[in-house]
Amino acid sequence: MSSDGNRAATTASDAELLAAIAEADRNALRELFLRHEPWLAARLSRRCSDLTIVDQAIQDTFLAVWRKPAAWRGQGEVAAWLWGMGIRLLLHHLRPRLSVAERLGRLRSEDALSAEEQVLARIEHTDVGAALMRLSPELRAVVEAVVLDGLSTREAAALLGIPSGTVKSRMSRARCELREALL
């Protein structure tokens, strides 16, 4: 921060910010939040129209970062790691907790969830979901951006901070790996 209260731009990488967060640097967490919250909110809000749930998933994501910054093992992009946490937490909030009576036989209405939210919630424990989780974080981030979020190559490149050609080559590798995993 500068003395006039305006946010000074930082040149610290995401990895450097995580290292600082591990040392309990709240300013590093703030910077990481300011850097990643806008795109994370945009992507999660495409999955869920309830902004309260989206906000809770985002808060939980950054709380998890604060509590365990070392969970990012230095592999892949920090953005992909944040996305993975964010979507899992969003799905967690979307799955209602059933009472014992509901579990013993009451029908649960899934009409409140959009069709996309229902598909995403169900894919997690399928062969496709397992194959997606086996992809490297870099490949999974591209698949999520292009296939699940429906972004163009250029939009995915901007979101992930990589060249468009890299998006295309990673998508090609991901297709091959998914094809092999699902045969």
Image: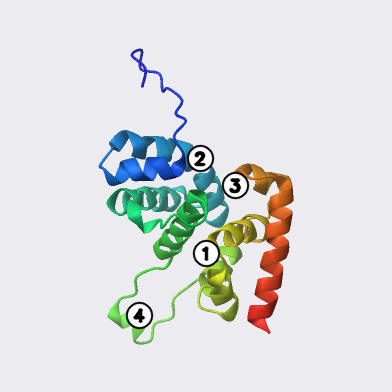
- Give 61 or 122, whichever is nearer the viewer: 61
Say whether disc 2 or disc 3 marks the residue closer to the N-terminus.
Answer: 2
Q: CA distance from mark 4 to mark 2?
A: 37 Å
Instruction: Tell me residue 158's x, y (percent).
Output: 64, 42
Mark 2 residue type: Pro
Q: Nearer the viewer, mark 3 or mark 1?
A: 3
Q: Are marks 4 and 3 in contact (CB under 8 Å)?
A: no
Taking the image as shown, residue 176 lies to the left or right of residue 28, namely right
Say whether disc 1 or disc 4 marks the residue closer to the N-terminus.
Answer: 4
Q: Secondary structure at mark 1?
A: loop
Residue corresponding to mark 3 = 160
Instruction: Tell me residue 41's x, y (percent).
Output: 50, 46
Q: Are marks 2 and 3 in contact (CB under 8 Å)?
A: no
Residue corresponding to mark 2 = 38
Q: Secondary structure at mark 4?
A: helix
Query: Are there few (<14), some (14-19), or many (20+) residues within 10 Å of tag 1?
Result: some
Q: Secondary structure at mark 3?
A: helix
- Give 63 or 75, whichever is nearer the viewer: 75
Tell me which residue sits at (45%, 63%) in the image: 91
